[in-house]
């Protein structure tokens, strides 16, 4: 049983309410920080913890905090990114829905560290019921004196507002989120300047994921050094993983980083193996944007070493044979999955969600969707596969924000690892035409058919 930091009290009846949360040690970190630590000392603890941002990129949180411009004299803001729109990712929702005060406590302690007087939680439009839960919890925190004027008699004021987005994936990108929070269309900004220098209302701003902020109370209460003891190497602490797809026990889990993928996938404590005991075909370990892994690269890397649930281990081998921990959206696929259809489905999503500012993303995502659709429906041409490869390469790295990369990588990885399945769709349209697309011929058979025909 791994250490639980975020979900320790998740199953306590009534933990959603201020009273029960407080009875279980809630808001202790605010007392500790405000009464016995300077803001810089809180930043130092977070740096020592080695915490890396849980929104996907894994940037060290303490380092990001140290970049915030304290010299300009402008107001500073902490913005919590609760947009969570990445397909396969639903861990932040779980935290906010079941333990809303943990996030609010984290917002207060973190805002103190950064010297903010006005902070925000930006939540996606589809989480309306969670928005209401947060609103209730914020009201309770105001009533108890943790928010508002002169908190704990220290002379420090903090207001916290929760803002509901309109339901656009792009608004999860931090600069688009800032634009949206300012009341504008959520188009990403060109960086630099980075938000830490010029963010919300051109003020110094830190944008952090829900999980990154919610872990700060534990770090302040127990020290960064204790946090750094959990995990493996530069992947310190615990991580929330939202597991979905063809596993026995889908759900949200808190794991210690460094757990083997095998144990996470197959032990009864976690996913319990494959649903209906069908063979594992592929895995996306970190949300729809990260490369898909074929079965032989899931539990072992290309060198035969154990694959672990950590930033480093999941990316071993680069994109040739690895993937990324990303946002922790762990999607399991069995042998009935059509990789072409899955890739088309993702491309449809990215095309729909592209903000349209950059031509490679605006045009390329639509083009990929179209080509994938014709391959999937049995109207593909042999040259379409290389065309797709070419399009994704022209998107990657050529856009203002990483949505372009997020759209390109799944296509690249699907072709890299499952090229024969694309060829099969092109060469044997009669075998897929009348089928339920989710029930496919086994990949080994697909490979065999394609190889036979090539020879
Ligand atoms: C298209 C796109 C969508 C994103 N969506 C989210 C999101 O829903 N939640 C999130 O925390 N980060 C998201 N990010 C990453 C944010 O830009 C940012 O890196 C993150 O909020 C920083 O928080 P962290 O340092 O705590 O990880 C997204 C990035 C892109 C490019």
Image (cartoon, helix red, strand yellow):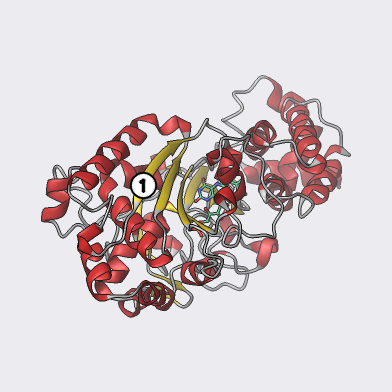
| Residue positioned 63% across, 23% down in the render | 435
Could you tell whether 26 is left or right of 71 in the image? left
- Secondary structure beneath label 1: strand
Residue under numbered circle 1:
160
Task: Measuring from the top left, give residue 3's x and y in whole percent.
Answer: 27, 66
Question: Which of these two is toward me, 423 or 82?
Answer: 82
Could you tell whether 129 is left or right of 77 in the image? left
Question: Which of these two is toward me, 159 or 217?
Answer: 159
| Residue positioned 42% across, 45% down in the render | 121
Above or below, comparing residue 230 to residue 145 in the picture: below
Give residue 223's quadrant in the image.
bottom left
Above or below, comparing residue 128 to residue 262 in the picture: above
Could you tell whether 195 is left or right of 209 in the image? right
Q: Residues within 10 Å of mark 1 (few under 14, many from 20)?
A: many
Give residue 42's quadrant in the image.
bottom left
Let me know if residue 247 appears in the view: no
Let me know if residue 124 appears in the view: yes
Question: Which of these two is toward me, 64 or 310?
Answer: 64
Q: Quadrant of the N terminus?
A: bottom left
Task: Measuring from the top left, give residue 455's x and y in whole percent.
Answer: 86, 47
Task: Measuring from the top left, give residue 43's x and y in whole percent.
Answer: 41, 72
Task: Measuring from the top left, give residue 396's x and y in whole percent.
Answer: 76, 52
Could you tell whether 42 is left or right of 64 in the image? left
| Residue positioned 30% across, 57% down in the render | 6
């Amino acid at each position: 049983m791994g250490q639980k930091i975020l979900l320790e009290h998740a199953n306590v009846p009534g933990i959603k309410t201020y009273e029960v949360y407080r009875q279980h040690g809630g808001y202790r970190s605010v007392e500790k920080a405000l009464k016995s630590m300077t803001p810089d000392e809180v930043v130092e603890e977070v740096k020592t913890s080695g915490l890396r941002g849980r929104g996907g990129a894994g940037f060290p949180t303490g380092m990001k905090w140290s970049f915030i411009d304290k010299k300009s004299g402008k107001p500073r803001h902490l913005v919590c990114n609760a947009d969570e729109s990445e397909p396969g990712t639903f861990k932040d929702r779980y935290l906010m829905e079941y333990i809303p005060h943990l996030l609010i406590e984290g917002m207060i302690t973190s805002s103190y560290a950064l010297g903010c007087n006005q902070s925000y939680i930006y939540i996606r439009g589809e989480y309306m019921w969670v928005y209401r839960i947060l609103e209730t919890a914020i009201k309770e925190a105001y009533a108890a004196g943790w928010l508002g004027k002169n908190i704990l008699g220290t002379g420090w004021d903090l207001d916290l507002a929760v803002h509901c987005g309109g339901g656009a994936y792009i608004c999860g990108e931090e600069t688009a989120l800032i634009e949206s929070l300012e009341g504008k269309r959520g188009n990403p900004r060109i960086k630099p300047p980075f938000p830490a220098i010029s963010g919300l209302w051109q003020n110094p701003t830190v944008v952090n994921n829900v999980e990154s902020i919610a872990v700060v109370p534990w770090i302040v209460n127990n020290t960064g050094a204790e946090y750094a003891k959990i995990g493996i190497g530069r992947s310190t602490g615990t991580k929330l993983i939202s597991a979905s797809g063809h596993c026995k026990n889908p759900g949200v889990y808190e794991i210690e980083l460094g757990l083997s993928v095998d144990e996470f996938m197959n032990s009864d404590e976690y996913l319990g193996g494959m649903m209906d005991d069908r063979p594992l075909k592929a895995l996306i370990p970190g949300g729809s944007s990260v490369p898909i892994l074929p079965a032989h690269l899931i539990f072992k890397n290309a060198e035969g070493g154990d694959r672990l649930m950590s930033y480093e281990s999941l990316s071993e081998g680069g994109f040739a044979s690895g993937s990324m921990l990303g946002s922790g959206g762990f999607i399991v696929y069995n042998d009935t999955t059509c990789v072409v259809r899955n890739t088309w489905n993702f491309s449809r999503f990215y095309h729909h969600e592209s903000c349209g500012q950059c031509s490679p993303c605006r045009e390329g995502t639509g083009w990929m969707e179209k080509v994938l659709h014709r391959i999937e429906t049995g109207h593909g041409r042999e040259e379409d596969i290389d065309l797709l490869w070419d399009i994704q390469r022209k998107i990657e790295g050529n856009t203002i924000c990483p949505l372009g990369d997020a759209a390109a990588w799944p296509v690249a990885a699907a072709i890299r690892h499952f090229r024969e399945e694309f060829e099969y769709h092109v060469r044997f349209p009669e075998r897929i035409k009348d089928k339920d697309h989710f029930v496919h011929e086994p990949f080994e058979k697909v490979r065999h058919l394609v190889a036979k025909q090539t020879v």
